[in-house]
Amino acid sequence: MDKKYHGIIPPIVSPVDRDENIDEHGFRALIEYCIEGGLHGLLVAGTNGETMQLTQKERNRAIKIAIDQVNGRIPVIAGVMDTSTKRVIENIKALEDMGGTCAAVTPIFYDRHTSQDETVRHFEKILKETKVDLFVYNIPPFTGIKLTPETVMTIADMDKRVVGYKDSAAAYTDFLKVVAKYKDTPFCVLSGATPQALSGILMGADGFVPALGPAFPKMFVDAYEAAKSKDVDLTREYDELIRESGKILGMTKNATAAAKYAISLRGHIDKRVMMPQDTILPDEEIKIKNQVDKVDGLYRSLKKG
């Protein structure tokens, strides 16, 4: 079944200038690089996009630029996560005014950790008051709650506008329960845990959301295609390559800074992260650049066969 949302949909970073406003020129260039690399969609203003560091104005501006630059060529999923149901609804209404068609929604967070039942009511209210497609976004390290497969399924079955699930909980057994239920339906199940992603696709998942997708777009697309075609031997080789690329994120204590620097090496954006995050150190830059070069070389060798 061809699903509207599928494949490699990375959480694109948000390039910013010295005043921490979106660098529109760099952002547009990066989006084009992603599309030219064959990526199947973009998640804008997500965790990797420093959405909670951006002002509301700049978050909306990032989303608007992405929608405009993509111009319908691939799906754009916009992060609307916030600290209350009302605030999320306001974010989605702003998205609708910008011409957006899909929102990634987490449980609420910050003031206190919410429950499974409260999260169900959260989505019920959002569905009643908005019009766009919704992705359920399960990211326990940032929300303080791990959604159970049963909660995800309850939300998914509420309305056909709940079109997908991004799982960043790294609970593989739970993830596969959701995959099994929606394997032959329009509902999209994406892994946010890159080390488990290709095995998940072999088991029926629809794609994944790699932080380094904008740094290695063609490599991730080829990896997805290998797994989707059930070529187990080739998938195993790509799995090793993806794990090699994943080492980049651990080469500094701030994974967002590591991802931004690796992506900046492609020549479209600056490495700058937003305050008060740790910046990347010179020796870390050298390590990351060497690792990017290594992954590029391994990918070229794999393509040559």
Image: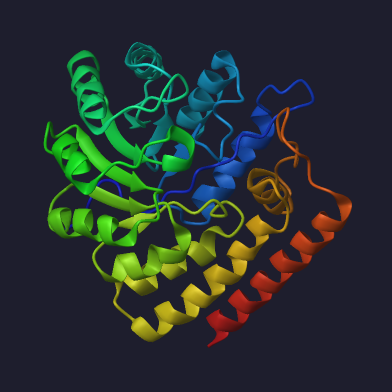
Indicate whether 258 appears above or below 292: above
Q: Position of residue 63 (x, y in %)?
A: 49, 26
Determine the image quadrant of residue 67: top left
Q: Residue at x 59, y 33 (%)?
A: 50
Indicate whether 191 appears above or below 103: below
| Residue 233 in the figure: left or right of residue 212 | left
Task: Tell me the colour scheme of the image.
Answer: rainbow
**Who is closer to the viewer here, 250 or 50?**
250
| Residue 140 in the figure: left or right of residue 102 | right
| Residue 257 in the figure: left or right of residue 125 | right
Q: Residue at x 25, y 17 (%)?
A: 130
Q: Residue at x 43, y 19 (%)?
A: 83
| Residue 157 in the figure: left or right of residue 115 | left
Q: Position of residue 187 (x, y in %)?
A: 19, 46
| Residue 203 appears anywhere in the view | yes
Q: Position of residue 40 (x, y in %)?
A: 40, 51
Which residue occupies the extreme right position in the image? 282
- How many labels, in total? 0
Indicate whether 84 appears above or below 27: above
| Residue 2 appears anywhere in the view | no
Q: Where is residue 65 in the image (x, y as percent from the top left)?
A: 53, 26
For the N terminus, the image quarter is bottom left
Indicate whether 89 appears above or below 222: above
